[in-house]
Image: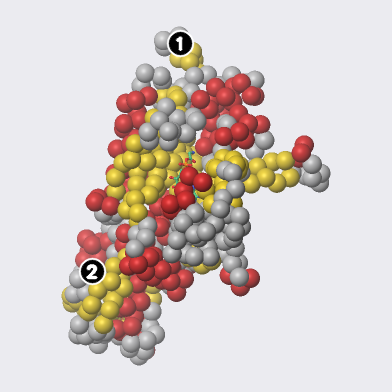
Amino acid sequence: MSGSQADKMAKIVSLCKRRGFIFQSSEIYGGLNSCYDYGPLGAELKSRVKSLWMDSMLREHENIKALDSSILMHPKIWEASGHVSNFTDPLVDCRTCKARFRADQLDLSSCPKKPSKKPGECEGEFTEARQFNLMFRTFMGPLQDESAVVFLRPETAQGIYVNFLNVMTSSRQKIPFGIAQIGKAFRNEITPGNFIFRMREFEQMEMQYFVKPGEDMASFEEWKEKRMQWHLAMGIRKEKLRFHEHGPKELAHYAKAAFDIQYEFPFGWQEIEGIHHRSDFDLKQHEKFSGKRLSVHDVDTKESYTPFVVETSVGCDRALLTLMVDAYGEEQVEAKEGEEGGQRVVLRFSPRVAPVQLAVFPLLKKPELQERARKIHQDLKKTYRLEFDESGSIGKRYRRVDEIGVLSAVTVDFETDSVTVRDRDSMKQERVGVEQLPAYLAERLIT
Ligand code: GAP
């Protein structure tokens, strides 16, 4: 990462803390590496991301149903899925500084002793590479022996496969249909990093679409496009998104074809979502390991078959980081119309994503202004995610709302039948009649 790009990431991390988006987990104890807590605005933003994803699945498709399966599952599931034997990364240790690296990602790491150098470019010498399983193991019940071992799920998808028939029959679905789930996943990553990009505890939003063999490739193409459209609809700039097709060496053990959607972060083009053609691998494996039938029977054609699966899998935290990075901007501003001069930082969230869409300010702390501003706040709060702020100069309040991505700021002054509305992006202020305010805002904020 170049100096200016590293600087941009550092500024985003700092803004996240300062404004209450994201905090280091267990900070007062020195922090827990690769784990993060979402503060008030981060929690709101995350819940926006999740609901916009779930809506795009459930509200736009009658044949997609939700699921919330448990994190702890029967340990045999991870044998069947291949995670016990295959979910590994090659690991090397540096004999000099004792740091551990992913052998296949040395060029993305840096030496902890000499951060300007990559591991191996210093005088360090590596051990032989060995495979390291990324699943977290724990014990269920009072015995702590091998018979009590369970895993924290490394992906939410397996909970969907093992419930495939439960969902299909209980919700009276026929192939093709999908199951959508949002939930925590855990991976003991060797080299977590880049803030919330690679974490050890994170959240996934996964949808498995079950299709008849023969209709799989058309469905795969359709989901690829739909998922790219979703990122664009979140307001992400088109030129910062691209597809990356997995070559034979990159394909996961279960995949017949796979594309990533990548975003250009300050640290380079990186995966934010995977669209995978998983064939009938998972259902067949669970049939084999559980001894239970997981095929379907088509009463019209009298055929029985195991469906193929098209999976869309996006990290919620990664989608959120994409939004933060894409929205972040800095610019020089002249002092005028209540604006403070100097550099302003602005998050240009789209209206559907912004955790706070609107702010209402009394110009001064005077009872008559406060009362009228409170009334406007009260009238609008059912329609918008909004904030009321009466402390500090108006210029400071504008700066703060820019930094958290608020689209419009309504200021109540001594004009009794009108207010000013300041636009985040243009910083222009317009005088709007109190009566006309709901329609004026609806045009700008309801998407
Ligand atoms: N079920 C398929 C699956 O889990 P994956 O490519 O390993 O596929 C899917 O993960 C998505 O989950 C990734 O595109 C990324 O957005 C997110 N993800 C994976 N590992 C992550 C980590 N350590 N931290 C944050 N997000 C992660």
Q: Which mark is residue 303?
A: 1
Task: Say which quarter of the image contains residue 391.
Answer: bottom left
* Secondary element at image label 2: loop
First in sequence: mark 2 or mark 1?
A: 1
Residue position for label 2: 425
Nearest to the observer: residue 15 or residue 395: 15
Q: Which mark is residue 30?
A: none
Q: Is residue 316 visible?
A: no
Could you tell me the amino acid type at mark 1? Glu
* Secondary element at image label 1: strand
Could you tell me the amino acid type at mark 2? Asp
Residue at image position (42%, 60%) is: 45
The image quadrant where one finds the N terminus is bottom left
- Disc 2 to disc 1, C-alpha distance: 58 Å
Horizontal placement of 82 versus 193: left or right? right
Residue at image position (57%, 34%) is: 86
